[in-house]
Image (cartoon, helix red, strand yellow):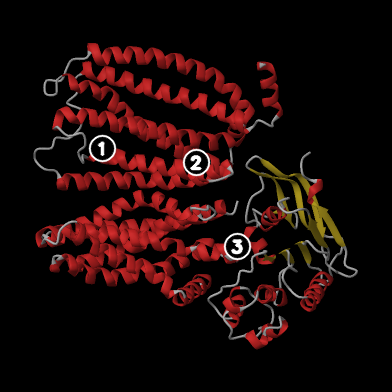
């Protein structure tokens, strides 16, 4: 566990130093959400209905944009090789990096999204469920994204390819989250959706790190 | 067990034993397809609701079944390739990706052709069509990843990991799409599904299903053998074969 | 503990490395003993870095194996990693952090015998005056010094170094050579690649010229 905390500390320290770059996906999120009223219609009814989906899809895209940061810098300057040779379970190393990534991107999104949702006339009583679904799901997004990034690390145009690989896997998260929000907006029970998302998170957290370790080995082949 | 895998998986031996299989599978495929198509288009009765257009089901449904089956074969090859590092398994992954994508595309296109007379539009966000579309995306991902690496062996390993992650996610994706679909389904949309099956419809369907499987396997053998020759071109056994051929 | 100088520590058996169509090395065999250094030479792209990656376990050979203490490194991965110090040809220094912070991370991640202070370590690599400088403002040579700092706190028996002397100036080269000699004298083993020569005094060295192992 000491390995986990050391890596977590290291990655968070690096994230703070790189905060200007890390802010870019969040700025992207804000801008793209604003594009929808401009491109579709500022009509209150329409926006209100679309709001959960728009916020969620944009959050997905913003997360994808930030994925590269997880391993790219360490891969390019040779640090990743060193980390992979540290004695200790590699899955803890990966877990720490994914956690650090989530704290630096996922968590800010959870805070930013409700604010941006106001611009889309988001049903106010459903904002709570927006926050909860994002809170449970953004770690899943970081986990799944890590696989895509790890697989494409050694490739030149890895970034866009990794996004294409990951997006289909995001679909269940998108569907369950937006269904939860819509249920909440219609005063219907939501706990079932939260439970599903929670289960998905637990399964991902347990299994994905192993896939990421295997993928990193492939990148170093 | 290990011995078995290494023996039958070794490039040279695989090339030998797959030759017989390929030949017979190809013959069976032609026979079954001939019978199946004849049955589907001339013998089987038209559906009382959908009329003659139901006949496209005999292609659409087996194609959809194959799209899933081939993904499973691909993921299984992936495990074999990663755990035992069998070269032939690595080649199979790449071939399955392409063949699987083709079956999925076939299912989607026939689905669209089936849908037009039924709903008036070529596309509808039906649970099955949506799942097939997502499956197509997954296949594209495997194909893209496989081809992005300079070294095909590394590409195959990466594709294997993706396929394995995919196979675990597919049930989750299907489940979520089903749920999404039932929630949003308007009353006028009917499901693109098999009508209640009479035996006279079931038999052609099963014949086509088996024909598609043998078709897939014979194509898989053909393509993997060709790819194997290309990859192993510096090996002595390949050079002998080339000499014999000329 | 007295060290038997004839004990073989690290061996490669029938190592073959293929990358796509190219066969980089074929059926390579080597054995390195306690207190011995193996210097790998070969032209660029000949497979030196690939071989080092295989030796460290970062990548796998197409065929063949590497053994440490006569055990396959894949089966004793954990133990092997504890005995291994690898410095690649990339500096592995975080540009966003200061020299002090980078050295602190080194001390935190890699266990050492004596609790070395950051200031002492900086002294040894000649960067005491630059502790608070951000590594993005260091020259290549200075960054290299930060990455080589590990050599001064190492308790690992096996050192695998990829071009350790690049980018550093003559004075520091002598410091590193001396450090290497001490490591070998106390029974450690070293594998290195180098373009230029390296002066290891009287220490037994093994030269491995990869161009001999290329096919045709």
**Quick check: do tags 2 and 3 share a chain?**
no
Residue bearing the label numbered 1: B129
Q: Contact, CB < 8 Å: mark 1 with mark 2?
A: no
Residue bearing the label numbered 3: A81
User: Is disc 1 surrounded by few (<14), some (14 to 19) or many (20+) residues within 10 Å?
Assistant: many
Residue A65, given in percent of the width and then of the height, sits at 39, 61
Q: Chain of mark 1?
A: B
Residue A219 lies left or right of residue C60; in this view the side is: left
Q: Chain of mark 2?
A: B
Of tags 2 and 3, the one toward the viewer is 3
Separation (CA) of disc 1 from disc 3: 44 Å
Residue B211 visible in the shown view = yes
Classify the position of the N terminus of chain C by image quarter. bottom right
Q: Quadrant of residue A44?
A: bottom left
Task: Please report whichever mark, 1 or 2, sits nearer to the chain's N-terminal start.
Answer: 2
**Secondary structure beneath label 1:** helix
Of tags 1 and 2, the one toward the viewer is 1
Residue at (53% x, 39% y) in the render: B80
Q: Seen from this angle, which residue lies furthest front?
A: A38
**Secondary structure beneath label 2:** helix
Residue at (89% x, 70% y) in the render: C201
Residue A172 lies left or right of residue A74; in this view the side is: left
**Quick check: do tags 1 and 3 share a chain?**
no
Separation (CA) of disc 1 from disc 2: 26 Å
Q: Is residue C179 above or below residue C44?
A: below
Query: Of residues B181 and A156, which is closer to you in this image?
Result: A156
Q: Chain of mark 3?
A: A
Residue bearing the label numbered 2: B78
Residue A122, given in percent of the width and then of the height, sits at 16, 65
């Amino acid at each position: 566990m000491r390995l986990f905390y050391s890596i977590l500390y290291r990655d968070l320290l690096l994230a703070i130093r790189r905060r200007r770059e890390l802010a870019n996906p969040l700025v992207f999120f804000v801008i793209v959400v604003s594009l929808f009223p401009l491109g579709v219609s500022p009509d209150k009814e329409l926006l209100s209905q679309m709001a959960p989906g728009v916020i969620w899809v944009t959050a997905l895209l913003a997360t994808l944009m930030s994925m590269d940061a997880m391993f790219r810098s360490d891969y390019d300057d040779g640090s990743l090789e060193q980390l992979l040779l540290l004695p200790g379970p590699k899955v803890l190393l990966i877990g720490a990096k994914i956690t650090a990534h989530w704290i630096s991107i996922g968590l800010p999104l959870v805070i930013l999204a409700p604010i941006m949702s106001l611009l889309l006339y988001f049903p106010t009583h459903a904002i709570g469920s927006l926050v909860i679904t994002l809170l449970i799901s953004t770690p899943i997004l970081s986990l799944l994204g890590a696989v895509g990034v790890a697989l494409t690390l050694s490739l030149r145009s890895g970034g866009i390819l990794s996004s294409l690989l990951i997006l289909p896997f995001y679909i269940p998260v998108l569907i369950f989250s937006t269904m939860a929000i819509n249920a909440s907006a219609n005063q219907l029970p939501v706990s079932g959706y939260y439970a599903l998302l929670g289960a998905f998170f637990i399964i991902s957290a347990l299994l994905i790190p192993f896939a990421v370790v295997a993928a990193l080995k492939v990148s170093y082949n | 067990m290990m011995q078995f895998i290494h023996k039958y998986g070794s490039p040279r031996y695989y090339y030998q034993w797959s030759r017989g299989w390929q030949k017979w599978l190809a013959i069976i495929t032609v026979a079954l397809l001939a019978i199946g198509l004849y049955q589907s288009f001339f013998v089987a009765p038209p559906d009382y609701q959908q009329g003659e257009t139901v006949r496209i089901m005999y292609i659409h449904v087996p194609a959809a079944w194959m799209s899933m089956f081939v993904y499973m074969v691909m993921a299984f090859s992936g495990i074999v390739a990663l755990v035992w590092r069998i070269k032939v398994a690595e080649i199979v992954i790449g071939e399955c990706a392409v063949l699987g994508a083709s079956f999925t595309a076939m299912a989607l296109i026939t689905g669209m052709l089936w849908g037009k007379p039924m709903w008036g539009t070529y596309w509808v966000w039906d649970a099955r069509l949506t799942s097939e579309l997502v499956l197509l995306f997954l296949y594209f991902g495997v194909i893209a990843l496989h081809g992005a690496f300079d070294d095909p062996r590394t590409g195959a390993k990466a594709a294997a990991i993706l396929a394995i992650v995919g196979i675990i996610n597919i049930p989750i994706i299907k489940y979520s799409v089903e749920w999404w679909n039932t929630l949003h389904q308007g009353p006028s949309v009917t499901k693109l599904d098999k009508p209640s099956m009479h035996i006279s419809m079931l038999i052609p369907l099963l014949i086509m299903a088996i024909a598609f499987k043998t078709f897939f396997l014979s194509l898989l053998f053909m393509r993997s053998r060709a790819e194997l020759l290309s990859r192993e071109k510096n090996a002595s056994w390949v050079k002998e074969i080339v000499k014999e051929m000329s | 503990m007295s060290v038997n100088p004839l004990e073989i520590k690290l061996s490669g058996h029938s190592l073959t490395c293929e990358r796509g169509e190219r066969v980089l090395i074929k059926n390579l065999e080597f054995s390195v003993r306690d207190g011995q250094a193996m210097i790998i030479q070969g032209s660029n792209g000949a497979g030196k870095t690939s071989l080092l990656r295989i030796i460290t376990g970062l990548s796998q050979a197409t065929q063949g194996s590497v053994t440490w203490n006569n055990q396959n490194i894949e089966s004793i991965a954990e133990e092997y990693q504890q005995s291994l110090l690898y410095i690649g040809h990339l500096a592995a220094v975080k540009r966003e952090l200061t020299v002090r912070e980078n050295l602190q991370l080194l001390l935190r991640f890699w266990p050492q015998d004596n609790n070395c202070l950051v200031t002492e370590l900086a002294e040894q690599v000649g960067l005491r005056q630059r502790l608070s400088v951000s590594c993005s403002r260091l020259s290549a040579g200075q960054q290299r010094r930060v990455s080589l700092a590990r050599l001064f706190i190492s308790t690992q028996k096996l050192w695998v170094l990829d071009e350790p002397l690049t980018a550093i100036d003559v004075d520091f080269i002598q410091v590193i050579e001396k450090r290497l000699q001490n490591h070998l004298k106390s029974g450690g083993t070293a594998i290195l690649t180098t373009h230029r020569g390296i002066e290891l005094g009287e220490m037994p060295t093994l030269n491995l010229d990869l161009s001999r192992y290329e096919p045709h």
